[in-house]
């Protein structure tokens, strides 16, 4: 895989677990991030700094098998807050249209990227048929668990032959939540992948193995502490030290959770 960011990594559970004398493969996780710029400024709550954010992660397997299915994700970068009211929105239903999202969503685009998948029979994790998809992030005004107060993104997925044997067009909702990392106010995306994507056919598992995404540096004006300011959809509002902590929590179908961390800049 061609890296497009400076690699930073945390690998989870790198060794096989022995149960009743047999070795069982386990997922491994790597989180990579290049930058949230421009520059290395911290930003502040009083004056949020518009930024872009390059972000990605990889899911592997300790025995080089197809990874177990992950169906929930929690993603946050310390001191990076989203201001959805600064940008145009479209509805989740408009973002979810097929074969192409509604034209009203064009102005609501806030990011892009790619996802590499591997799929195969659930009982044969040696099978790793590829399915590569294009990712588009859209600023939405409603959707599953998307509130008017915090907003959310539609993670739009599009693919078909020759990149993938399946024709897939649609979105999943990723609500924005207010959290803190290192005591710094932060926005966290939380989303669940529908069964139709993790199990595209009976007896078939689809595993995400590599994600590359970019939240664009797009701006608008909103009220911040009573003052109307120019902010980015993604803006830096501070950080504890010289680097930002990034965390991603992966949840598999057995509800096992693992949180991986990295920092930037490198």
Image (spheres, rainbow, N blue to C red):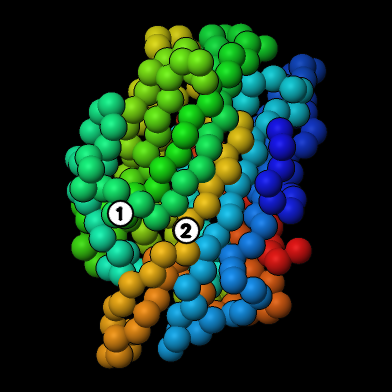
Q: Where, by quadrant of the figure, is residue 245 drawn?
A: bottom right
Q: Where, by quadrant of the figure, is residue 87 drawn?
A: bottom left
Q: Secondary structure at mark 1?
A: helix
Q: Residue at x 48, y 56 (%)?
A: 215
- Answer yes or no: do the residues labelled 1 and 2 have beta carbons within 8 Å? no
Q: Residue 64 appears at what percent x and percent y?
A: 74, 22
The circle on residue 219 is none
Q: Residue 174 appears at what percent x and percent y?
A: 36, 49
Q: Residue at x 40, y 48 (%)?
A: 137
Residue 145 seen in render: no
Q: Is residue 182 left or right of residue 100?
A: right
Q: Nearer the viewer, residue 81 or 134?
A: 134
Query: Which residue position holds label 1?
Result: 108
Q: Is residue 229 left or right of residue 236?
A: left
Q: Is residue 240 left or right of residue 139?
A: right
Q: Mark 1 and mark 2: span between their CA atoms?
A: 11 Å
Q: Is residue 69 left or right of residue 104?
A: right
Q: Nearer the viewer, residue 208 or 99?
A: 99
Locate the N terminus by quadrant: top right
Residue density around tag 2, few if under 14, some if 14–19, many if 20 or more, within 10 Å: many
Q: Residue 203 appears at what percent x and percent y?
A: 45, 9
Q: Residue at x 65, y 75 (%)?
A: 40
Closer to the chain start, of discs 1 and 2, is: 1
The circle on residue 216 is 2
Q: Residue at x 64, y 74 (%)?
A: 39
Q: Is residue 34 above or below residue 228?
A: above
Q: Secondary structure at mark 2?
A: loop
């Amino acid at each position: 895989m061609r890296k497009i960011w400076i690699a930073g990594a945390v690998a989870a559970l790198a060794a096989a677990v022995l149960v009743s004398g047999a070795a069982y493969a386990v997922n491994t996780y790597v989180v990579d991030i290049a930058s949230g710029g421009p520059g290395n400024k911290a930003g502040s709550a009083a004056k949020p700094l518009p930024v872009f954010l390059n972000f990605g992660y990889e899911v592997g397997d300790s025995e080089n098998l197809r990874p177990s299915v992950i169906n929930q994700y929690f993603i946050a970068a310390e001191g990076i807050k989203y201001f959805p009211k600064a940008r145009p929105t479209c509805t989740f239903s408009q973002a979810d249209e097929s074969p192409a999202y509604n034209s009203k969503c064009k102005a609501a685009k806030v990011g892009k990227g790619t996802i590499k998948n591997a799929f195969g029979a659930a009982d044969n994790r040696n099978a790793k048929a590829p399915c590569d998809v294009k990712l588009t992030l859209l600023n939405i005004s409603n959707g599953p668990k998307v509130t008017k107060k915090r907003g959310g993104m539609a993670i739009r997925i599009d693919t078909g032959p020759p990149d993938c044997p399946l024709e897939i067009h649609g979105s999943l909702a990723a609500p924005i939540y207010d959290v803190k990392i290192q005591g710094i106010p932060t926005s966290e995306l939380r989303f669940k992948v529908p069964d139709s994507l993790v199990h595209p056919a009976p007896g078939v598992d689809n595993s995400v193995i590599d994600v590359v995404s970019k939240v664009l540096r797009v701006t608008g004006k909103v009220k911040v502490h009573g003052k109307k300011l120019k902010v980015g959809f993604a803006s830096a509002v501070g950080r504890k030290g010289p680097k930002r902590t990034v965390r991603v929590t992966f949840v598999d179908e057995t509800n096992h959770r693992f949180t991986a961390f990295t920092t930037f800049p490198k």
